[in-house]
Image (spheres, coloured by chain):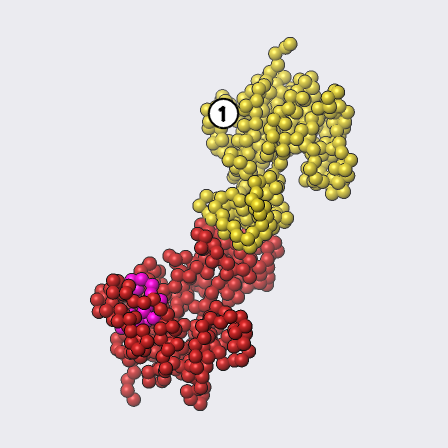
Chain colours: A red, B yellow
Amino acid sequence: MTAHPPIMPVILSGGSGTRLWPLSTPECPKQFLPLAGPDSMFSATLARVEQADGFSAPLVVCGTGHVAHVERDCATEQRQNVRVLVEPAARNTAPAIALAALAASSPDTPMLVMPSDHVMRDPAALLAGVAAALPAVRDGALATFGIAPAHAETGYGYIAMGDALDSNGAVHRVSRFIEKPNQAHAKKMLADGGYFWNAGIFLMRADAYLNALDSHAPAIADAARLAMARSDANARMIHPDATTFLTSPSVSIDYAVMEKAANVVVAPVDPGWSDVGGWAALHALSDRDDDNNAIEGDAIVINARGNLIRSSPGIRVAAVGVDDLVIIATGTDILIIPRDRAQEVKAIVERI
Amino acid sequence: MTAHPPIMPVILSGGSGTRLWPLSTPECPKQFLPLAGPDSMFSATLARVEQADGFSAPLVVCGTGHVAHVERDCATEQRQNVRVLVEPAARNTAPAIALAALAASSPDTPMLVMPSDHVMRDPAALLAGVAAALPAVRDGALATFGIAPAHAETGYGYIAMGDALDSNGAVHRVSRFIEKPNQAHAKKMLADGGYFWNAGIFLMRADAYLNALDSHAPAIADAARLAMARSDANARMIHPDATTFLTSPSVSIDYAVMEKAANVVVAPVDPGWSDVGGWAALHALSDRDDDNNAIEGDAIVINARGNLIRSSPGIRVAAVGVDDLVIIATGTDILIIPRDRAQEVKAIVERI
């Protein structure tokens, strides 16, 4: 048996979402917040692969403005070997993963690409999916991980599952990718079965990904190769050349590669996944009291039900007689919005 | 015509209410907050008599913990002659006014006693009532000022109006004082007419008040006289003797004197009065936008109606899709409560 290179975790930390404003901000996006437990979601993403066999040191891909957050979460002894690839600018996922592929120690290194701002209650379920997909990936397949849909969500892309690769059915060919559907289409897929949420988690060999890029999005591959050839790097930090990288098209891996490549497979997994896509999602995944209140921080709650309340240190929230609200208090901003309208936080951020 | 001494305004600043928590606190009660305009209500109370003829320098009666607030609001040139009588401890209004009476420059000085935590939109209306009541007061009457009830309020005492003193009907004898009524009684008084809210504003000669105290509450008069005989004073500050003053019973002027004295008169006035007795009252008297929102401070309000929003400097409130809430944000405390339940703020203060 040939010795295989270990899997390199690639932690994508490029997000700068505003759906969890005012906690998340461009300066401190949600992956760096302890939204679902004592550690940041970024830190929890690293932790997923730290205890597991078969993985090498992770590579973090982040923006220049977030290096300090990454360094803080990687300050432990155990994380001294984490490498940090600093994107000169956000160019979406396809270019970011291309940089990561070029930083792999060997072309045949499998990369487990994971967004850093998702919650997984059961990381072992993902790792089981990774193990199931690994043989096909070693053979050159591009693997995705599909989450069984819990409801007719219109905010995610879907993966239509094709034939099983083998008799145990753990890995299937992808029949096609479906972009964010409308409500009717989402309901039909939920009813029909065989469709999975595309969670943006991938397993693929560095060379397989770069080859696919060369075929389907060569400008991205070229910009990444040149930026890495001109990079400034030490054992910890990699700084690709900014001028070169800025010439790259800004495209997602789904659009640039996955929807076009032939050898794409999907492993259905159920790791208790949430992308914490908004305040309502955070309420759903949080611990709640008998009155369905999810409370973190100093709060006095009287005759109040179904609220999500978060107060930063030094701030005390007193909520009396209010139901189903999201109440978020930082030292400078306070958000009050009904839980079922929490997606309208975008209107506020736009106003700001 | 004999030369009469001018009226001495006596500004009572003993309140430490918590109905406007978290803005008002024991350290900074509501009279020192700019709740209805750019100045504090205490400052606005002083301003009411500063432009008027016939008044001497005011005397402020406040607690030891509030001297700094008083000094801040009296730091202007115009207020250099304001005197400050520092109560060694809160003993309710009858003893406080006794101290003030003993600080008058002559026994026949009329005192206009005013709480410092009320709003008056039309101070001239009060001053007209003062002018109307003054002749009777010079003759020894104890005058109150009655506010025509706007609704069947159960939170105030009432004054039953008796016969008019003269043909123009500006001043009447008081037939009796009614303590805080129940709802049915309040409705009946509103329907019957001839009843007025007791706003705690009084006009009376210093000696007339002390004589009435001697008759009806001699222990208060004695304690006040001894405390003032042993006081420590300069041109600005008067510190009555604490040990002596602490022996005084703690009783309101209404209970100790007004309900018992024979020569009590009432002048009905309509000065656009509010005691700002809670957040709902503040909403009612505040400027409001087209959506009935009363907003002060930095706030982003979208699809929201009927809210009272106050944010302290440096704090921004974003309220989306919420109606009829009270949202108060200081740097450390945030209150969220429905406007029609805002009196329940007491439950929070008790919990704290």
Density class for disc 1 (Cα within 10 Å; few <14, some 14-19, many ≥20) is: some
Residue A160, visible in the rendered structure: yes
Residue occupied by mark 1: B79
Residue B210 locus on image (x, y percent): 65, 22
Vertical side of B124 occupied by A335: above or below: below
Magenta residues (range): A85-103
Residue B237 locus on image (x, y percent): 50, 25
Q: Indicate whether residue A94 is drawn in magenta.
A: yes
Residue A8, visible in the rendered structure: no
| In the displayed structure image, the side of residue B17 where residue A265 appears, left or right | left
Front-lying residue, B72 or B313: B313
Residue A238 locus on image (x, y percent): 26, 66
Residue B28 locus on image (x, y percent): 52, 38
| In the displayed structure image, the side of residue B281 where residue B187 appears, left or right | right
- Residue type, label 1: Arg
Q: Indicate whether residue B238 is drawn in magenta.
A: no
Q: Residue at x 49, y 33 (%)?
A: B69
**Which chain does the numbered disc 1 sit on?**
B
Q: Dividing the picture into quarters, in which one does residue B246 lie?
A: top right
Q: Residue at x 39, y 57 (%)?
A: A26
Q: Quadrant of the N terminus of chain B?
A: top right
Q: Residue furthest top?
A: B1
Q: Residue at x 46, y 43 (%)?
A: B313
Front-lying residue, A76 or A60: A60
Front-lying residue, B181 or B66: B181
Vertical side of A1 occupied by B339: above or below: above
Total number of numbered discs in the rendering: 1
Q: Dividing the picture into quarters, in which one does residue A233 lie?
A: bottom left
